[in-house]
Amino acid sequence: MDTDPITGLGKAEARERLDSYGPNRLLEKPSKSPWLLLLDQFKGFLILVLISAAILASIIGNIKDALVILVVVVLNALLGFYQEYRAEQSLAALKKMLAPEAEVRRDAKTEMIPAEQLVPGDIVLLDAGDRIPADGRVIVTHSFEVDESSLTGESHTVGKWNEVLDRENIPLAERDNMLYMNTTVTRGRAEMVVTATGMETEMGRLAGMLAEAEEVSTPLQIQLDALGKRLVVIAGIVVVIMLIGGLLRGEPWVQMMMTAIALAVAAIPEGLPAVVTVTLALGLHRMSRHQAIVKRLAAVETLGCTSVICSDKTGTLTVNQMTARALYTRGQRFAVEGEGYETNGRIITDDSIEPPDFNPVLLPLALCNDAYLRAGQVVGAPMEGALLVLTAKGD
């Protein structure tokens, strides 16, 4: 990286590299302007049907109904706009609060700078509790451990050192001499030389993939659009039937047209979008009381539709407590009761041995895991009818 680990980069060199590599931040989609956010509230098919109904009502002279429909549509749009705009502002405020700083060595002096100003070649000093501001290669470590769960999904901390790795194509989770942006130092202190910043980091690659993802409609939006289309079809059929029937009876053409349009307008449930928006707003308010920010109002209903959450083996997306339910060893089967780290539970064997022999299952558990109980105590403990609770580290 053409840098001196003792003195770090010079300030002039750092400025040149900043101009060359750009600021150390992840690119995001630009936030929508308030006007675009407001116009988005009128994109739903059912809302467009209501606006059309208001226009038709005004054409036939039913100004009162037209005004009522328009007032409902506008109030619905303002309520949705308010909730989503407030969520945007909250997210923007959180990003400002979380803007990190980095302790770097430049011109042989240690100083704190905004993490955005980091460049490849900078020497960064890290302590327990710091958030790593960029990708880098470890050059000095002292009992150093990092939580990389945000990147790898593994819940346990990872030890880091400055040894050279002699293998090729090493998986990211096994690169023990590398540090990655937005992971957290849990123990010790270290120094690293920055190797990648901004969108060139591993987090940057993930951010790029997320930015390419297309926005899709929520289940509720799809259902409301389908309902709006069905209502239009039904109203159109009613208009045609009424018009043809009246003309066959000899009714005046203009009068029958007015009657058919009035029936079509009456078939549109103008209160439905307002009821849906108010219901979602109440759900959003309840979630905000639990410190959850929902960016899009319709996403509240999507969360309610979730029936399956896929998690990895560490249970990262759950409460991080995985429970074995069945054991098989040396020709014996055992069933396990209980939840997580709770001490209430039983190990049950399907054998008719009285008292049951738990040695075949307890001894391998004690010997194969890095248990907090000493192996001597486990071997020497009386096993008849006893339940031994092991708290183990690692896998």
Image (tube, grey):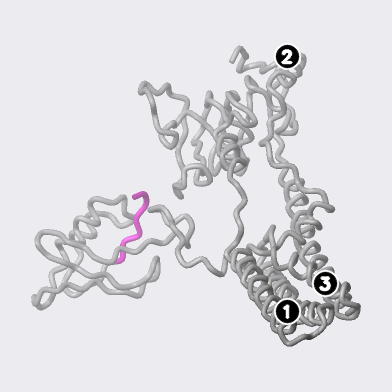
Q: Nearer the viewer, mark 3 or mark 2?
A: 3
* Image: 146 above or below 309: above
**Viewer-nearest residue: 394 or 135:** 135
* Amino acid at circle 2: Glu
Residue 276 in picture, x, y percent from top left: 69, 74
Q: Which residues are magenta?
A: 389-395
Q: Residue at x 40, y 66 (%)?
A: 341
Q: Which residue is mark 2?
A: 13
Q: Is residue 137 magenta?
A: no
Which of pointers 3 and 2 lies earlier in the amino acid sequence?
2
* Camera-nearest residue between 134 and 130: 134
Whether the magenta-drawn stretch holds residue 393 is answered as: yes
* CB under 8 Å between discs 1 and 3: no
The residue lying at 9 percent from left, 62 percent from top is: 331
Residue holding disc 1: 243
Q: Residues within 10 Å of mark 1 (few under 14, many from 20)?
A: many
Structural crowding at the residue carrying mark 3, measured as other residues with C-alpha within 10 Å and reported as few (<14), some (14–19) or many (≥20)? many
The part of the image, by quadrant, that contains residue 99 is top right
Residue designated by label 3: 56
Q: Is residue 201 left or right of residue 344?
A: right
User: Which amino acid type is shown beneath numbered disc 3?
Assistant: Leu
Dot 3: what SS? helix
Q: Please give the label number shown on residue 94.
A: none
**Residue 137 point in image, percent of width and height:** 53, 25
Q: Residues within 10 Å of mark 2 (few under 14, many from 20)?
A: some
Left/right of residue 147 with respect to residue 9 in the rendered view: left
Q: Are marks 3 and 2 in contact (CB under 8 Å)?
A: no
What amino acid type is highlighted by mark number 1?
Leu
Q: Gap in Å between the C-alphas at discs 1 and 3?
A: 16 Å
